[in-house]
Every structure is written in structure tokens, then in C-alpha cells.
Image (cartoon, helix red, strand yellow):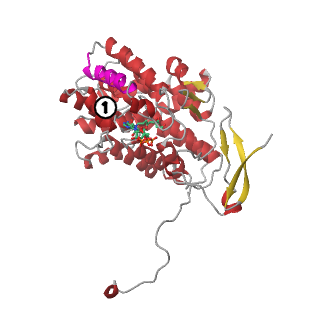
Amino acid sequence: MEEFAEVKISGKSYELPVITGTEDEKGIDITKLRALSGAITLDSGFKNTGATKSAVTYLDGENGILRYRGYSIEELAEKASFMEVSYLLINGELPTTAQLSEFEGEITNHTLIHEDMKRFFEAYPSKAHPMGIVASLLCSLSTFYPDSQNPNRTEEEIELTIFRLLAKLPTIAAWAYKNFVGHPVVYPKNELNYGDNFLNMMFSLPSEDYKIDPVVSDALNKLLILHADHEQNCSASTVRIVGSSHANLYSSISAGVIALWGPLHGGANQAVIEMLESIHADGSPLEDWINKAKDKNDPFRLMGFGHRVYKNFDPRAKIIKKAADDVLSKLGINDPLIDIAKQLEEVALNDEYFKARNLYPNVDFYSGIIYKALGIPTEMFTVMFALGRLPGWIAQWKEMIENKEPIGRPRQIYTGENERSFVTAEKR
Ligand code: SDX
């Protein structure tokens, strides 16, 4: 039975259809609001505004639920491979054995980047932040594959670009790391799986090959799955809106990387470790830091805490917190930062300010501790987030294109000057 919302403006009433999602979420469809009433809606930061209908990921922030194409994040993190989850997000179903083998085979065959791209690295400063390199080289891939710039691509051409992106991002990411540490690049090895190939390109040296540790391999697989998608977050929305102008997929993904870099978004995982290291070095009582985070006059915030959607535990944070304990104990690492993180969590969760605002640890609070234990430097943490999020961004872009969604162009409420006449400089 169709449902309607009634809006009253200047004494006149308007009826707007209410749409209901698969999980009974309600949305007021305002498509016709301006034509009917001349009014628009205003919602800075889109805190209450849906930008699209999507079948990719479901989030329930109140109950801490996250599902990719209907499968719970807990099951996928425990039982799936990152390649299976990538296939699931992009194609909507878990792959059969044959489909997975073909998917992985296609990706394996595209892991090299054009040798000319090595010259890019000669131009970057040695300590160039890897996110800046990754965003630039992803966009530059569109110049090496000019066919990808054609907005009327065939499905096969889109699929080839998707394979190239999934295949080449680990290579670009690992080479950005090698540039950061001043080591020679390591080429992909086709006999290794996706995550192990990345680790090998990151940590192998001319003097010795990296020895794949199953603990590290499993932790990376889990982390990539946990970061794979998160519905209409800032970077996914960026990918969608850039893609809605029919800019090519490489450039849309590059825009997503840039949005993710911000410390309020994916850059928080780097900011969390830097925060924990400051707290560790400073030695002040944790309450002092909690009070700083609560002080409106102090720019300090408890990084890795709070979330636009989760008003309960971020289910990913729970899994990562346990994985951090497992990885540290299996690798025999005693990192004081995890104890500080746990104590900080304990103090914050019992503090009225955090409880009143439903601020809980998010995906970024513990992830850096695992990346650090895997030997990944802080500057690479957000690149790791991008590596995981790539299939999600691709899935969101693909859905937007397949649904033939219009170019994104929000409205505004103007608050500037009324009309006024030009006056010459002498009269100003
Ligand atoms: C990610 O959207 C996604 O799905 C993102 C993500 C994904 O997978 O794509 O989950 C990944 O980006 C996780 C978030 C990583 N960012 C951080 O950890 C940075 C620290 N967190 C905050 O900056 C903040 O919580 C945000 C940005 C995450 C959410 O901000 P909102 O939804 O705009 O909420 P807000 O800033 O308006 O905060 C509401 C209140 C405010 O206080 P009052 O004005 O009500 O008094 O809570 C306070 C804020 O000051 N607050 C915090 C806080 N986070 C919110 N106070 C102290 N420390 C914090 N971390």
C-alpha cells in the first residue's frame, strides 16, 4: 500500500511518496518537491539525506549491523577471501569455484604497470606521502588506456578497466611505499595470491625475498575484507558524483582515494596511531586526553572514535580489536599502544560526554595497531584502507552507471547580497 508524507509550506500542503527499503527503512522521495512547491530541502553533510537507492551494502547504525550483498561482515571476515568478497560486491553474488578462478586469473594477468610509469617516481620527493602518489597514478592510468575515457564503453571494456584497477593498485601502492623508504621496486609474482603478492612487493629486497607468514597473510585478508565497502560514505559518494559526470572510472576512483585521505575519514587510521604515540610519549593521565577531546576550544578529537552512522559499536572495530590481540600474540609483539587504546576505550565508553553522543570506536581505532604489527609504516595506513575499499568503490560506481543515474548537482539556499549595481573604484 503506497504511503505518503505530507509537507506544509506557507499554508499549502503537498504529498510526497514514501519509499520503503528491503530492511523496512523509510525515505521521503522529494523528486517532485521543487516542482510542486518551489522549495528544496537543506541538509548540510547529507546527515539525513539519501543520495541513491543501492543494493550493495546494508548498514544498521543503531544495531551495529554491516552486510555486503546480504552476507554479514562477521561471516565474510571469518570464512571468505578478499577476492571472493571483491567479486561479491562487484557482481552481486559469491563466485563459483570456476568464476573465482577466472576472476583471479584476469587480475593476475594485469598486475604490471607500464614501465613509463616508473618515471613518475623519479619526480616525487623521497618522503612523498604514498596517498598522493597513489591518487595521481590511478588517475594517470586513464592516459595509458585512453579507451577507458570513452563514456560509451562496452560492458567488456568496463570489465577490463575493473580488472586493471584491482590488479594494478597493489603494485602502485607497494611501489609508492618503496619510493617512501628509498628501496628498489619489486615486481608482481603471478604465483602469489592477491594479498601475498602485495606483501611480497612491499617487503622483498634485492638481498632476500619476503617470507610470507600465514598469520600476516590471514590478518591482511581479514583487514581488506573489513574495509571493502561501507555504502554511501564520503569517498564512495565522491566516486559516485565524479562518475556521474561520465568521467572515466580511473579518475572516479582516484577522486575516492583523495576523499579517503582526510583525517575525518580514512586518514583517521594514521591519525589514531599518531595520537596513541603522542599519548604514550607524553605520559599524562588518559583522563587529561579525554577532557581535551571534550573541550570545544581544543581542536583535539579522539581519533578513531565516533561515526556518522554507527551509534553503537562499529562491528568492524570489534573484529579488528580481537584480530589485533591475535596477531600481536602470534607474532610475539608487545605493543604498548594497544594497551593505551584499550584503556582509552574503557575511559571513553564510561564518560558521559561520549555516552550521550553515542561515540564508540570505529574501524580506524584498532586497525593501525595491526598494520604496525605487520611492519607497515604509518604513512601507508590509509593506502591499506584504499586497497580494501577499491572493490566497494567499483561496485558503487558500477551500480550508479547501470542505473543510469543523472549527473550529481545539488541545489543551495542563497544567502548572499541582493542585486546591486557596479560602482567604479573611485566610488567604493
Ligand atoms: C570512517 O561514513 C563512513 O562509513 C566512514 C567509514 C567507512 O568505512 O567509509 O566508516 C570510515 O571514516 C570512520 C570515521 C573515521 N574518523 C575519525 O575517527 C575521526 C574522529 N571522528 C569524528 O571526527 C566524527 O566522529 C566523525 C567525522 C567520524 C563523524 O562526525 P559527524 O557525524 O559529523 O558528527 P559530529 O562531528 O557532528 O559529532 C557529533 C558530536 C559533536 O559534539 P556536539 O557538537 O554535539 O557537542 O560528537 C562530537 C562532536 O564534537 N564528536 C567527538 C568525536 N566525534 C564526534 N568529540 C570528540 N572526539 C571525537 N572523535
Q: Is residue 56 magenta?
A: no
Which one is nearer the viewer's eye here, 364 or 313? 313
Q: Residue at x 47, y 28 (%)?
A: 314
Left or right of 338? Residue 57 is: right
Dot 1 alpha-carbon crowd within 10 angstroms: few under 14, some 14 to 19, many 20 or more: many
Which one is nearer the viewer's eye here, 306 or 411? 306
Position of the N terminus by quadrant: top right
Position of the C terminus by quadrant: bottom left
Quadrant in which residue 322 is drawn:
top left
**Residue 320, x across and y down, in percent:** 42, 22
Looking at the rendered structure, the kind of residue marked 1 is: Ile
Magenta part, dominant SS: helix
Quadrant in which residue 185 is drawn:
top left
Q: Quadrant of ligand 1?
A: top left
Residue under pointer 1 = 290
Would residue 185 be seen by someone viewing this image from the given angle? no
**Residue 360, x across and y down, in percent:** 43, 29
* 213 in relation to 41, above or below: above
**Residue 162, x across and y down, in percent:** 53, 40
* 63 in relation to 418, above or below: above
Q: How many marks?
A: 1
In the picture as drawn, the residue positioned furthest to the right comes out as: 1
Q: Residue at x 45, y 32 (%)?
A: 356
Query: Ligand 1: does it lie within 8 Å of the C-beta at label 1?
Result: no
Left or right of 396? Residue 344 is: left
Which one is nearer the viewer's eye here, 171 or 35? 35
Q: Is residue 347 magenta?
A: yes
Would residue 189 be seen by someone viewing this image from the given angle? yes
In this picture, which residue range is highlighted in magenta?
Answer: 334-349
* 386 in relation to 400, above or below: above
In the picture as drawn, the residue positioned furthest to the left comes out as: 282
